[in-house]
Image (cartoon, grey):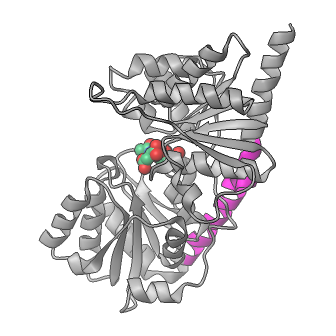
Amino acid sequence: MKIGITCYPSYGGSGIVGAELGLELARRGHSVHFISYAPPMRLGDGNAWRAGVQFHAVDMLSYPLFEYPPYTDALASKLFEVAQEESLDLLHVHYAIPHAVSAYLAREMLRDVRYLPIITTLHGTDITLVGRDRSFLPITRFAVERSDAVTAISNYLRDETCEMFNTDCPIEVIYNFIDAEYYRRAPREEVRRRLAPDGEKIILHISTFRPVKRITDCIEILARILGSGGARARLVMCGDGPEREGAEELAARLGVSAHVEFAGKKPQSEIRDYLSVADLLLLPSLTESFGLVALEAMACEVPVVATRVGGIPEVVEEGETGYLFAVGDIEGMAEAAGSILTDDGLRKRMGERGREVAVSRFATEKIIPQYEALYRKVLFKQSALQKG
Ligand code: GMT
């Protein structure tokens, strides 16, 4: 199949999933065309420009009148152009805002020539945070309802979408996935020594440092662990974003700065190295429709301490692959983290179970065929409609 994929190219879960899906589809022999304002980050990681993958940049005209450049229109024009030039069979957009609207426009522009099916995958904040805003809700609902197929990355997100949009539009749940061969624990002693030179346990947090990630909770949890006199630990904070400064200030105020490393944004290969030496992943988010990073941790045998919100309980098996708590339950999370860090047997058992779950439920081999089946279903329905 010839598949157009649009996703945000920047750091963040939906962009990672869109990019990885495209690469996996190309590996399976499909021809994949990424269409966005920049190449998705995962494609720039060295191994990415593979046969069967092309990138088409959305051209943005800069003009003084446009205080806010009209990206939705520019993307729609590019989708229309690429669909024609490359004879795309379908468009698959990740993150509804504004991608679903642009895809809808492209489909309508092309309609006189042929019908171009569009598939929208909802990732979370496009519905739960941004979609909730009154100014975005009607147009997002419109574009979602008019997609030829809609998928959500968890049951939680499907239910939220139906409720918020008050729609009975069919939404298929296709979980996020992991390349379990790439994400597996590997010996990285030099990384461990660098991150924890005095043999401390390593607590890892990886995110976009947006308010929804509640990264200051990580600092407070660390302070409690250290204050309880239990485990000797270092907190490694991977990523960057608006909450970083506040977290650094809090670490200084609580006197734990020396035990925290703000590592910045890291390429995928380094993230894997960090996961290979981590003893625990902390994910204290306010909401999380899936929690891709929890899955990456589980694949690398890292137990997860997270909040019991959104789709996280569909990924992290409570008591088996980690522990879940109410949002803001610093004490509960610190206690659970402490028990994992001071009990090597527990850490190992939970880690091994995490790997099992990641491989058996979320490996690419399980999930990518679900997308391929959906594409075939949409194309079959369309050709039946044309014939009939
Ligand atoms: O929350 C983020 O880090 C970014 C956001 C995005 O759209 O890139 O992530 C969402 O999509 C990810 C991939 O499907 C999910 O794993 C995240 O849980 C989801 N974030 C939220 O729902 C807050």
Front residue of 115/210: it is 115
Say if residue 294 shows up in the picture.
yes
Residue 46 to residue 260: above or below: above
In the image, taking residue 19 as reference, residue 233 lies left or right, namely left
Residue 70 to residue 343: above or below: above
Q: Which residue is located at x 71 percent, y 54 percent? A: 364
The quarter of the image holding the N terminus is top right
In the image, taking residue 25 as reference, residue 55 lies left or right, namely left
What is the residue that sits farthest to the left in this orientation?
253
Front residue of 237/79: it is 79
Does 358 appear in magenta? yes
What is the residue that sits farthest to the bottom in this orientation?
198
> What secondary structure is the magenta-colored segment mainly?
helix
Say if residue 290 shows up in the picture.
no
Q: Position of residue 216 (x, y in %)?
A: 25, 59
Front residue of 78/4: it is 78
Residue 5 to residue 273: above or below: above
The quarter of the image holding the C terminus is top right
What is the residue that sits farthest to the right in this orientation?
387
Q: Which residue is located at x 35 percent, y 33 percent? A: 62
Which residues are drawn in magenta? 348-369
Q: Position of residue 342 (x, y in %)?
A: 42, 81
Figure quadrant of residue 317: bottom right
Does 279 appear in magenta? no
Q: Which residue is located at x 66 percent, y 46 percent? A: 54
What is the residue that sits farthest to the top in this orientation?
388
Figure quadrant of residue 47: bottom right
